[in-house]
Every structure is written in C-alpha cells, then in structure tokens.
Image: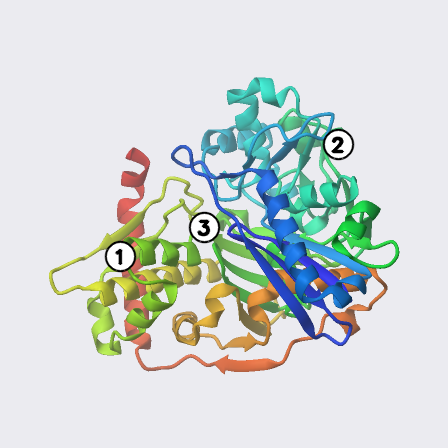
Amino acid sequence: MYLGLDLGTSELKALLLADDHRIVGVARAPLTVERPRPLWSEQAPQQWWHALEEGMRALGKSHPEELAAVRAIGLSGQMHGATLLDAAGEVLRPAILWNDGRSGAQCDELTRAVPRLGEIAGNLAMPGFTAPKLLWVREHEPEIFNRVARVLLPKDWLRFMLSGEAVSEMSDAAGTLWLDVGARDWSDELLAATGLTRAHMPRLVEGSEVSARLKPELAARWGVGSGGVVIAGGAGDNAASAVGMGLVEPGQGFVSLGTSGVVFVSTDRFLPNPAQAMHAFCHALPGRWHQMSVMLSAASAVSWAAKTFKFADEAALLEAAASVPLAQRERCPLFLPYLSGERSPHNNPNAQGVLFGLTHAHGPAEIAYAVIEGVSLGLRDGFDTLRLPAGMPLREVALVGGGARSVWWGQLLADIFGVTLTLYAGSETGGALGAARLAWLADGGSVAEVCTLPPVKQKLTPSTEGADGHRTRHARFQVLYMALRDQFRST
C-alpha cells in the first residue's frame, strides 16, 4: 500500500494506492490563500501541516488497515513557493506562492545579472519563480533575508516536517531558477546572483528515489506502516500528474484544469524555449524532461466568476455556459482570464481580467460562456508555444484536474485545440496518484509496472462544427490582449 500526499493551492489530498493500481481511499482538506496587498499571494506553512493532520485523521478513520499497510509515501505539490527557514528550522514568514506577482523588478535584475539564465535554467525570470522572490525579500525584508538558513519548496517543507530531512527533487527544483536543468544540479552561478549558496538549498534526489524516512512518532500517531516508512523524492504537481496518468514517454502530455491551467508534454531531452515563456523542466523520472506552458487563472477564474455573478457554484456556471447555443456563442462577450497576471506566452504580471463587448442582450449564461471560453483560449495560446523536436509526434493528450469533471468543457477544449483529448479514470486525483506511484517506485517498483495508463473513460474528438467560429474568436482574443497590454502596465 502506498500513500500519496498532494499539497495544492486550494486543498491537500491524501490518497491510498494498492499495488494492483486500485485507489483505495482519498481524503481532502481545504486551504486558503491570503492576498494582503495587490499582486501578493501567500500561505502560512502551518496551514499546510494542519491540513495534513486533518487528512491523515480522516484516512485513519475510514481506512485504518490500509494505512497500517503503507510501505512508502510520495509527495506532490504546488511549485515555486518560497518557504524560508532560520537556522533552527523555524518558518520566518508566510510562504510566497507561485501566483504571487510582486517581484517583477527583481526578475529584470536577475536577467541582467545572468544573461545566460534561459540557457541554464530553461526559463525566463518570472515573478512566479522562487529566485526573484528571494531578491524581493532581500530588498524589502532584509532582516528576514539575513536570517534565512534554508529555502524549501512547499511539498519539501512537508517532507522536512515528516522526516527532519531537507530534500528536494529535480522536477520541483527546476522551477526555482536555481537549477541547471540540463545537468540536473544546483547552479552556483544562479544561486550567487540571489545572494545564496548551496548551503541554503536542500540536497537533490530523483523523484522516484528514496529521500528520507517518516519519523517513528508520526507513524505511530497516524497508524502508518508497521516498520520504517520511506518517503520518495516526489514531484512538482504537474510532473506528478503526468506520472499519475502514465504520461512519462516522449510526446505524451496533458491539459490540466486546476487552479492554474497547464499544457504539459514529456520529452527525452532538455528543450528550452524561453522566448515564448514556455517552461522546460526536469520530469520526475531520471533521464526525462518536459515542456510546459502555464496560465495563472484557470479553474480559479471559474470560481471567481461563479461567486461574483451569483451562481450557486462552479457546476451551475458550467451548466449555464453549456446552455448557450453554438450559433449564439460568437455574440458572447470576450473574457481575458488574467486575474493574477499571466505567464505563458505573455510573461506579464500586470495583465488583468477583462470582459469585453457587454450589451443589454447578455445575461448570466453568456457571461458564463465567455469565462469558460476565455480560459480555454488562454490555454490554446500556451499549447501553441510547445515545440517538439523533429520526429517526435504528440502521441497522447489527456485532460486532468478538477475541471476535467466537466465533459462539456473538455469537448470545448478539444474543439478549440483541434486535438483529441482523453479522459482517464482517476484523472481528477492525478497529482496525489502520481505521488503514490513515485512512492511505489521508491519501494522497488519498475516504471513499466507502475506508470501504466489508467482505463480510458472517454475520448473527446474535435468537432468540425463551429471550427471557423472558434478560430475567429481566438484571433479576436489575441488582438484584444495586444490592444490592452500597455494599459495594463499603466494601471
């Protein structure tokens, strides 16, 4: 039995996986984000621990025997968050999250300091990444910066609490701008540019390797395992989702409808394309990498719209959007979904959300459609930045994340992308499932045995009906962003 822990932005998931691939049990605990100032996004790490305790208590009540049979734990989590510890291992300030946009000036500073940044790290300097956050802390909170003894990513802080060990792995570390992504090692040049050294960094392992062991007192308190329980290196959330869906071979990928929106494809080599704000990261398995485009507001934009426009919940908003006939969609408003700025392909922390073209004829259903369509068009922009090497076909594109529960939205994405999207069983638990699979690998499982494709629930094939309308709407969407780009900066 294997335990996968997925530390998201809005919830923590704990998943029990049997060695016949059955998902035995899942527990969830909610999380909240604090936004004390414009562009800021923070969480107190103590909230993550409380959520973990809640999840473990729930599993202990519902599946005590299975929990007692756990042999290994895997970790998945939101990437890029800066969790700062002092020499005693105490948290110095709330963690600055992946969707925090305060460090735009520091990104410019880092780019000037290291002209080879994209070549080494495979990515542009963006406010979401970890390194610019530390430059911001050094400039604005020097008393805290001077006390920093260790910088950990969110899931790696959980590992520290679970084991007492400061360890990270390649996929998550690749999102810091401190990793030489091709060499899979910390870059002394990039660390020095932010006033840090290797001593501030956790040691590195591959995601499928043993990283640490669960503290005996925690194992006893939660009823986990009967002997020493190992903790796998784990993965950043998207690499973990790929492992969970078995998408680890070159040309396999997915579209994720989580808090953020992601287009992900596995590769067998390091293929940076920073000019279009595409990410090139290590995969969670040795000798593998991946390309990824990220938009900062996907399902979170749907949650915002459901609350703002008084829908009962996100499902009600999706139902209203689906009720708009195809012939009327071209008259709906356009929605730019940049509620937290944007990464791919714009790298613009100042970008803002826009509802454009409202008239008296538009009601809640048309606004709901505009929001869903806007997120989908933003994802299409990211999809278009992927550059596979010659001879590497795009073999499989899955649809994962909480938004994947809506078949209607999945079909709209297939139509807008012009590719077939596959819905797999268990896709909504991708990160936690991937973490559990990495635990299985750390316990001695083979990639062929563990990283299988789940059963197919449905294939969503693009429809030719309305294709011209989607192309026209996408072109207008892109023109609208370009027309407003300078206005975003001025406001």
**Residue 169 visible, this orientation:** yes
On screen, residue 345 versus residue 111, left or right, reads left
Report helix, strand or loop for mark 2: helix
Q: Are marks 3 and 1 in contact (CB under 8 Å)?
A: no
Q: Are marks 1 and 2 in contact (CB under 8 Å)?
A: no
On screen, residue 417 versus residue 71, left or right, reads left
Total tally of numbered discs in the picture: 3
* Tag shown at residue 475: none
Q: What residue would you read off at disc 1? A: 309
Dot 2 amino acid type:
Arg
Q: What residue would you read off at disc 2? A: 198
For disc 3, the neighbor class at 10 Å (few under 14, some 14 to 19, many from 20) is many
Front in this rendered view, residue 325 or 440: 440
Asked which quadrant contains residue 463, the reply is bottom left
Front in this rendered view, residue 74 or 46: 46
In the rendered image, the vertical position of residue 277 relative to residue 256, given as above or below: above
On screen, residue 400 versus residue 119, left or right, reads left
For disc 1, the neighbor class at 10 Å (few under 14, some 14 to 19, many from 20) is few
Dot 1 amino acid type:
Phe
Between circles 1 and 2, the one closer to the viewer is 1
Instruction: For marks 3 and 1, give the CA distance.
Output: 21 Å
Instruction: For marks 1 and 2, give the CA distance.
Output: 49 Å
In the rendered image, the vertical position of residue 268 relative to residue 125, given as above or below: below
Look at 80% across and 51% down and name the residue there: 220
Front in this rendered view, residue 307 or 416: 307
Q: Where residue 299 appears, x then y in whole percent?
A: 43, 58
Q: What residue would you read off at disc 3? A: 296
